[in-house]
Amino acid sequence: MNIKLLLAGISITAIISLAAFKPATKTLYDFKAKTIDGKDFDFSTLKGKKVLIVNTASKCGFTPQYADLEKLYMEYGGEKFTIIGFPANNFGHQEPGTNDTIKAFCTKNYGVTFQMMEKVSVKGDDIDPLYKWLTAKSENGVQDAPVMWNFQKFMIDENGNWVGVVMSQDKPECDKIVNWIKGAK
């Protein structure tokens, strides 16, 4: 056998072998978390739904977005779309409360009915694993999108794939989010 053919065969085999061992990109469905009530939540239960994930805070200039999120949830939430809120105290200590006080605040002041999760860290050394996936291209396979402030919104498609990010200053009912929910191009 010709040595060049042998080496070419080995190279092709090595490339195929390396590709086979490349880990698959994670999806939302690979994660679990705790609800604000301390119950286990498996994100794989959201298969088939578009999901808007938002880091929230009770003492922020963007806190009134809770009302906008609830309105969006009331209009589009159900079998095809949902919202998940993650309280976080990473920016200006604007979410100092416990899960119980956060839940009471959201219910009393904004009538929040979409799923709220337990308080997490959305950046830094103690970043929650889901937020590591949301913010790092090496994890989500699409884009680096570090959380810059409270009420940053991440869009996840019906297959659990990361599809986009909307910054804090953009309201939940902005065209980018509504068109995405409706499936408009």
Image (cartoon, helix red, strand yellow):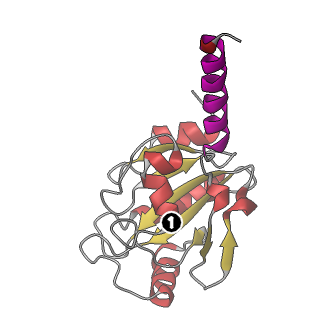
The residue depicted at 38 percent of the width and 48 percent of the height is 145
Residue 9 figure quarter:
top right
Quadrant showing the N terminus? top right
The residue depicted at 55 percent of the width and 36 percent of the height is 179
Q: Is residue 168 above or below residue 126?
A: above
Q: Is residue 21 magenta?
A: yes
Q: Position of residue 154 (x, y in %)?
A: 49, 51
Can see residue 87?
yes
Is 2 left or right of 36, judged from the image as shown?
A: right
Q: Relative to the observer, which residue lies in front, 139 or 184? A: 139
Give, as a single range, the part of the protein colored magenta. 4-22
Q: Position of residue 77 (x, y in %)?
A: 66, 56
Can see residue 172?
no
Q: Relative to the observer, which residue lies in front, 170 or 145? A: 145
Q: Is residue 45 above or below residue 79?
A: below
Residue placed under numbered mark 1 in the picture: 129
The residue depicted at 52 percent of the width and 48 percent of the height is 140
Q: How many marks?
A: 1
Q: Position of residue 4 (x, y in %)?
A: 60, 12
Q: Is residue 178 magenta?
A: no
